[in-house]
Amino acid sequence: MKNDDNPVVNGWDQIWQGYRAPNFFGRRLHAERIKTLRKVLAGISLPLTASIVDAGCGSGSTLSILRRLGYAKAIGIDAAVNSLKISAQLFGFQTDKDVFLRDIKQTGFADGSFDMVFSQGVLEHYENRSDALEIVKEMCRISRRYILLVQPDQTSLTGRLKELWHSLSGASWEKEYRYTRTDYTSMLDKCGFRLVGSGSSNLQEEMWLLYAKTRAAI
């Protein structure tokens, strides 16, 4: 599956092709996400029977956290073929059982299929805000209760230093476009979800934003 019209998917497909294991910074982020997810999910008392989809699951790292926390119905979707391959290598996830090859803009799931849609580090890769909004609309369509975003906080000191490092070193294959908390909240509000909780992690490198459904998505 080649996404000729989606440089974001193709870029990540190349990254996962050569990926072997997380480095020190990746392991630190993983540890911080465990804390974040445990805190957020406990805070809303989301039962372990809840259905969760990790939209843009990448290497399967966050999906592995959700499974470790006891959410057996959690699954992941990604449009990059090599994402599913590396998630199998790292965590033993099976295609079409644990992880699925799906377009995040058109997942093919029925309306309200999941109690929660989780997404980490997807939206900021889209320069065109209308593309990001299309993704948000689809996440809202398939969620019946919550959407949890974990995004880089590019406005924090840590985020600005990371952005500068990427710029000077050429370490990133693609620019992370600057989105603010207000940008995300504005998009979710248009789709009938309101912000009910937020916070930061890993020295403010990331921020988490929890949204609850208030009306039918558009």
Image (spheres, rainbow, N blue to C red):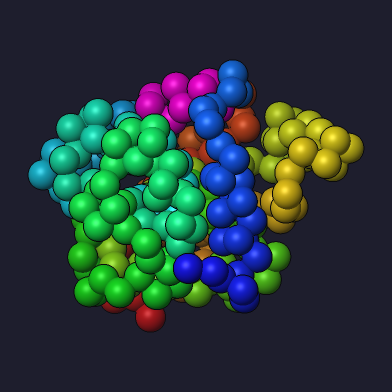
Say which quarter of the image contains residue 70. top left
**Magenta stretch in the rendered image:** 26-37
The residue at the point 46 percent across, 49 percent down is: 83
Q: Is residue 83 magenta?
A: no
Seen from the viewer's position, the closer of residues 194 and 191 is 191
Q: Does the magenta stretch include residue 29?
A: yes
Expressed as whole percent of the image width and height from the top left, the position of residue 216 reads 29, 76
Above or below, 162 against 80 in this view is: above
The residue at the point 22 percent across, 68 percent down is: 112
Expressed as whole percent of the image width and height from the top left, the position of residue 93 reads 29, 42
Expressed as whole percent of the image width and height from the top left, the position of residue 201 reads 53, 28
In the picture provided, is 17 more to the left or to the right than 103?
A: right
Name the residue at the right extreme: 168
The residue at the point 30 percent across, 74 percent down is: 108
Expressed as whole percent of the image width and height from the top left, the position of residue 180 reads 64, 52
**Would residue 195 be seen by someone viewing this image from the given angle?**
no
**Would residue 204 be seen by someone viewing this image from the given angle?**
yes
In the picture provided, is 118 more to the left or to the right than 68?
A: right
Seen from the viewer's position, the closer of residues 96 and 52 is 96
In the picture provided, is 140 more to the left or to the right than 12?
A: left
Count of marks, rendered view = 0
The residue at the point 44 percent across, 41 percent down is: 86
Name the residue at the left extreme: 49
Secondary structure of the magenta portion, mostly? helix
Above or below, 112 against 74 in this view is: below
